[in-house]
Amino acid sequence: MSAPAETRIIFKHIDEEGYSNDIACYQKHGGYEILKKSVTQAPPDIRDEVKKSGLRGRGGAGFSCGLKWSFVDRKSGKPIYLVVNADESEPGTFKDRYIIHQDPHQLIEGTMISCFANDVKQAYIYIRGEFPEGARILEKAIQEARDAGFVGKNICGTDYSCDIFVHRGAGAYICGEETGLIESLEGKRANPRIKPPYFPAVLGLYQCPTIVNNVETLCHVKHIMDMGADEYLKIGTPNNTGTRIFCVSGHVKKPGYYEFPCGAVTLGTLLNDVCGGPLEGRTFKAVIPGGSSAKILRFGEKFTIKNKDGTTKEWTVEDIPMDFDSLAAAGTMGGSGGVIVMDDSVNMVDALANINAFYAHESCGQCTPCREGSLWMKKISTRMVHGEARPEDGELIKNVADQIAGRTICAFGEACSWPTQSFVAKFGDEFKTYATDKKAKPADSLELV
């Protein structure tokens, strides 16, 4: 079977021969024309169009972008800020980096339209510290846009003024959480804030109303204003509109980034037809469909899905449509679009030890269940792979994870506990037999993320 054709909107010019990331090339391909039209419209009309489009955030939670904008406190008299979350820190995810490197003006145009729609006079792009080249590219692109009148004072010859500044993080996973990001942007340790009262839409950056949107999300805003919400609604499936970029890594023949309408491809189609299937002599064993914090799926397992009309249907892992709601119905999530594939050469205890080492390192330490629990999960799984595994360790480590989720200020508690809970639930047999099936590893052989 041949691989289905991609529908590239955000990635239309990514990897295109002759396409460069400077403003001249971008304008040659119609860049900033949508911004010129948008600044002649009423901001509430733009907000309504985005809400009508059904655009959901592409950073992880899949929350309605238009609804998030509607929560902004516009009556306080305080300035409203927009923060671009370019802290792409979820393992398995690498789409935003390519947008920044190869098409930065698309992000700038989407950001400026969003700023105009929400009466924002100052925006920040928060980019993770490991992307120094991305930061340099953005600084150059913003200056080009500023010189051309698309950023800064009197944008496109109007009375509207708004500037964008790039802020580099120090490379912390927790800064992908919006309130932790805001704390870092203010120059403080990135400890997520308690909600309520610190909902960014009311009390965000500098205690002012703040919108935090992901890179890919803001790029979609430009295309919604170009084609209109009614046309955008035709892409994807109900409640899962537009396209989605999938970052496929791991044990497939053709890993990479692929853009399809939400729900247009199943997980099986994506992995077998688009990505070429498993490596020679191997079979698929498991997949994490939304970045390392999403719950793992085991190939061969079946799901009973309840339809809205009350009927049910049976799915295998390969039958799951790649959209937010279908993945949630299967007990996992679309997350940030990072599809991590594992074949039958992978031992799940080894894989979980790697993930647990990452989350123990990245906990901000503010909440006791997360600070202590992530460390204990790391200690148990590390002990297992270093030759001291016990048959009861699977239940022990799951018990620790069960005490974390739902007991922390931010969603990091779920992010670090869901892998353990799902790995043990789906591959409990490997945890029970690990002590006898695997030989002890040298202390320096554990590969950490």
Image (spheres, rainbow, N blue to C red):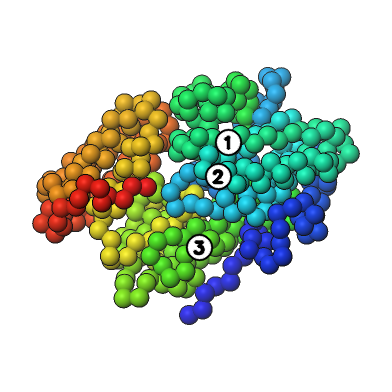
Amino acid type assigned to the residue bearing label 2 in the image:
Phe
Residue 217, which numbered label?
none
* In this rendering, position of residue 174 left or right of residue 19: left
Residue at image coords 60%, 20%: 207
Residue 318 in which image quadrant: bottom left
Mark 1 residue crowding within 10 angstroms, few (<14) / some (14–19) / many (20+): many
Secondary structure of the residue carrying tag 3 is: strand
Secondary structure of the residue carrying tag 1 is: strand
* In this rendering, position of residue 44 left or right of residue 392: right
Can you say whether 214 is above or below 98 in the image?
above
Q: Position of residue 309 (x, y in %)?
A: 45, 57
Secondary structure of the residue carrying tag 2 is: loop
**Residues tagged 1 and 2 counted as in contact (Cβ below 8 A):** yes
Q: State which tag comes first along the sequence, 1 or 2.
A: 2
Can you say whether 149 is above or below 271 in the image?
above
Name the residue that disc number 3 marks: 256
Q: CA distance from mark 1 to mark 3?
A: 26 Å
Q: CA distance from mark 2 to mark 3?
A: 19 Å
Residue 131, which numbered label?
2
Residue at image coords 77%, 57%: 25
Mark 3 residue crowding within 10 angstroms, few (<14) / some (14–19) / many (20+): some
Q: Position of residue 244 (x, y in %)?
A: 56, 56
